[in-house]
Amino acid sequence: MTVAHSITQFKCRVCGEPLKFDMKNPGAFISKSDHEDFFGMKLTTYRVAHDTDDERHFNTVIVDHAGFFRGHRDAYTEPLDGITPTIDRNYWIFHEESSPIGKTENVRLALLISRTDRWVVDVVCPNTMKVSEIATLMVDRVEESQRVYNVIPQPMETRIADMDIHAWTSDERVLCVSFTNGSLKPTIDALAEHIVNEKEDSIVPRRRMLSVIFKILETNPNLSPSMLSRIMNEDMLFATLHTPYEERIPSIVERTAQRFPVAAEILGPLLRGYITFVDVLEGEFSSEYEEIFELIDFVNRRRILG
Ligand SMILES: [Zn+2]
């Protein structure tokens, strides 16, 4: 193995500018978290920011032990002059490669809104709707309800334009969902408190992962809270894998597929770095998420790629 270098290069996901930072220099990044071995890789997540004239662009990136960029976890923009929450009605919507789900069979709209940091994540949202306006109206309703009730009902039911909305709230967040029918309501009711009370260090949750969750729920409403939390927080799902021993890949795939059939289809492209686990979960394999996570744990526990 070559000597690890400490300069990591990647492109800002907001503006496309090439950026670099020195992972050995604590002043070069905002935060850092190390992860357990993942598919034989030692990965670390860094949050890095750079400024343009009037905005600060944040990028959360996954980097391997040799300093190579392995993937983006999220990216978002903050105005540099700061927002005064009581006056300014702007919410910042964050940047993702994928677009929100337009609509699902059972959900017409699902937004996660921050009451403290002024962001909104459009999980399920037709492009005909103004996300920022809905967020503003929704937070107004929550504040109104806070004046009326000692404890806000969970969910609180309200109406915005022609949509019946169910809203689950914490001090920091509001999850608002408009259902097309009642079939997913009990499931989301059971999971909502975990989404609005999420206390992970990241201030912006990953829309891609929330979208994956809503997609999974459409086919399998029995998503457990622990699995939900795992899908929302596992950075490594965004990493492009790299296996030093390419020639071993076919036998690893074959052996693993005997235990987890899904491996036959996904493990080869994953190990060759063509796709990431997020791509897999977003696509046709979303309903097989349990087996996919079992596969991840199996490979890591057995150190198959160590
Ligand atoms: Zn930028």
Image: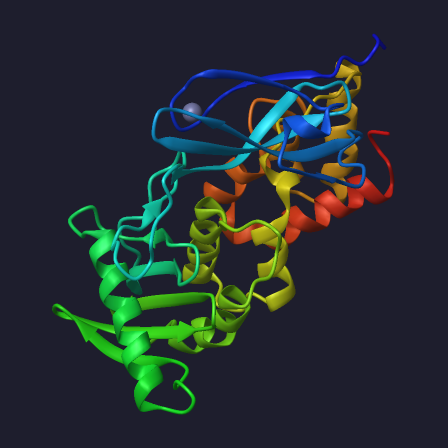
Q: How many marks?
A: 0
119 left or right, relative to 108: right
Q: Is residue 271 visible?
A: yes
Residue drawn 84% across the image and 33% down it: 304
Residue 271: quadrant of the picture: top right
88 sits to left or right of 151: left
Q: Which quarter of the rendering shows the C terminus?
A: top right
**Front in this rendered view, residue 30 or 198:** 30
**Residue at horizontal 25%, vertical 61%?**
136
Location of ligand 1 given as a quarter of the image? top left
Residue 78, image x and y in percent?
Answer: 40, 40
Instruction: Tell whether 111 sits left or right of 283.
Output: left
Residue 76 in which image quadrant: top left
Above or below, comparing residue 3 to residue 156 in the picture: above
Q: Position of residue 240 (x, y in %)?
A: 62, 27
Q: Is residue 200 above or below residue 255?
A: below
Q: Is residue 175 above or below residue 244?
A: below
Q: Position of residue 275 (x, y in %)?
A: 55, 28
Q: Residue at x 43, y 17 (%)?
A: 17
